[in-house]
Amino acid sequence: MLRSQVFAVLRRPLFYRFVSTTRSFIPPSQLNHVGESRPRRSGVQELDAALMQEIADEVEAEEEDLDEIDEKPKPHPESPSFYTGRASYYDNLIELQNAISSTRGTLKRLHLLPLPEFARKSLIPMPTVWKTPREMTVDFETTITISRYRKVIALLNELNEYLRIATTAGYEEIADKISGIVTIFESGKKDAILTRGIRKPIELDRCGRSYTSGRRKTSTARVWMIPVKESPQEEDVDVEEVFGLPQSQSKAPAVNVSVSTILINNFPIVEYFPQPVDRERLVRPLKIAGVLGKYNIFTLVRGGGTTGQSGAIAHGIAKGIFAHEPETGTVLRKAKLLRRDPRMVERKKTGLAKARKAYTWVKR
């Protein structure tokens, strides 16, 4: 019983105005007996009065502390976006807008804005890759949604455009200031992303040889090409006879070219590819580029059959020709020789004899 009463008192709200008195309430009917002795209060009533007094003292102390806090002047927030819940995001957004505004004003005073269309096309290309929304979430210390990300990217693209104008015009001081801001928001994988899909140029060694590789189906070929040294006395040579190609019906006059060699796995082309179709496929890049008999070619090929191996060697030869003579690139690209032939054998399917052939079905 006593414990429940104590908890009932403690559960009362703190900010409650209690009226404490040392005397008990005297009804009007007992005013005549004020001077008479009153009965003593029980122990429960004395405990209740002590708890009430203690709570009242605590309330008065808290009120005094609150009065002291209210008297102290509150400090001003560091930024105007303090009460938005995303102060870091809006502060960075304001900084970008201020940087764009000041840069725009500077470029206008230098008569670099607005630019005509022909001048804008002649600006130095400066492609960039911005950070992803996840990376910007860490920098801005708040979740970057798609709409917020678009706002930031729009400001950064405008700032990057001003960087191109300042760099092209030769104002290095302005360009350095803008570059310091742009670099903060650039992705760390910028170089890898910008160089993606760009084919590395094939370099010739000190002997003038090129090394390339070609692929077709499951075949892989490594090709070395070196120009033929021109001899002082050149004889008329029948090219079709040298490479074992079928003779045309109308006998064409012999062409004055130097004799070249094509070795495949240390075998001559006629011995390694007995079928003329495979030899024609291999020599096709040389014919299209007009350099038949101009290079000695040594190849190592592995995997696949004759069709795949001849196609892989042709792919490597086309890349080697482009390395030696870049002006032939247009012709080779139109003939689709500089890229790998993507056609492959279709896989066998479960329940079928081959890729598409079905077993014979008999009803009865």
Image: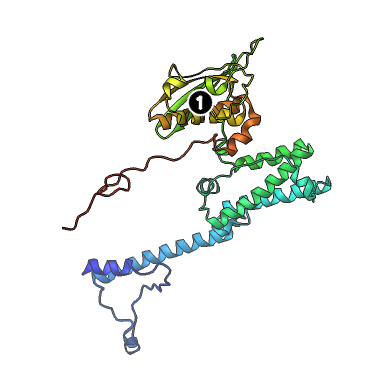
Classify residue 155 as left or right of residue 104.
left
Residue 51 versus residue 282: which sits nearer the camera? 282
Q: In the rendered image, which quarter is residue 9 located in?
A: bottom left
Q: Secondary structure at mark 1?
A: loop
Residue 191 x, y percent position in the rendering: 57, 35
Q: Would residue 201 be seen by someone viewing this image from the given angle?
A: no
Q: Quadrant of residue 226?
A: top right
Is 190 located above or below residue 300 in the figure?
Answer: below
Q: Is residue 164 visible?
A: yes
* Horizontal side, residue 63 vs residue 47: left or right: right
Farthest left residue? 364
Q: Residue at x 62, y 19 (%)?
A: 257
Q: Is residue 13 above or below residue 220?
A: below
Residue 216: x, y in percent? 44, 33
Query: For the residue carrying disc 1, how many other residues have a C-alpha within 10 Å: few (<14), some (14-19), or many (20+)?
Result: some
Mark 1, residue position: 245
Q: Identify the amino acid type marked 1.
A: Leu
For the point 30% across and 48% down, the residue is 357
**193 or 155, which is in the foreground?**
193
Q: Pinpoint residue 195: horizontal percent, then vertical percent.
A: 57, 36
Position of the N terminus, as image quadrant, is bottom left
Q: Who's the residue at 49% across and 31% down the image?
A: 281
